[in-house]
Amino acid sequence: MKRTAKKWPRKCSTKFCRGRTWKHYHHSTCPKCTSRAEKERAPLKVAFRKLRFRAKERGHEFTLTFAEYEKFAIETGYDKLKGKHSHSLSIHRKDETKGYHSDNIAAVSLSLNSKLAFSSIPDYLLAEYEDEMKRRREEFANGGGQTQITV
Ligand SMILES: [Zn+2]
């Protein structure tokens, strides 16, 4: 019987997925399914990488290590919500002139997140929202009348 070598690219091994995978990609699933699986397996690591990517993209310093991030996440209760609510933890900087350092990060409360149904909003947008909220609160405290918040 003649054997025919399998050709590349191949179909993603996920059922019903129409994505492709390549010989040198070293995964049997397409990039989409691979990252999804990784997110389920190690949500904290994925969230950490995303935070670091966003921070660098926005020109913020980033000295936070994964170990520090993990400790922070566990302390703030994020680890209990991993998977289902991967966007629930939003980190913002206490001192906005400084970057992401272990002593300059604070978490937006999870109860606030769920109350406002923010679980589907990416962290960086939530951080922007927090910045905006803070700015408006200060504006209001200084006698400004613009307190209406639109999301
Ligand atoms: Zn796929």
Image: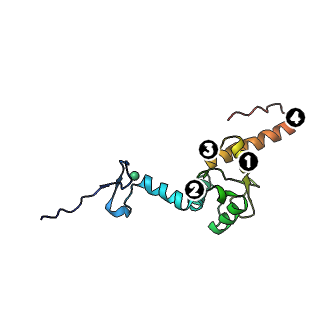
- Which of these two is toward me, 86 or 128? 86
Q: Nearer the viewer, mark 3 or mark 1?
A: 1
Q: Position of residue 145 (x, y in %)?
A: 83, 30
Name the residue that disc number 2 marks. Answer: 50
Name the residue: 64% across, 62% down: 62
Mark 2 is on which residue type? Answer: Lys
Q: Quadrant of residue 69?
A: bottom right
- SS class, disc 4: loop
Any atom of ligand 1 within 8 Å of the CB at mark 3?
Answer: no
- Residue 111, labelled with which disc? 1
Q: Earlier in the sequence, mark 3 or mark 1?
A: 1
| Residue bearing the label numbered 3 | 121
Amino acid on which disc 4 is placed: Gly
- Residue 63 in view (yes/no): no
Q: Counting residues from the N terminus, which is met first, the one under dot 4 or under dot 2? A: 2
Looking at the rendered structure, the secondary structure element under dot 2 is helix
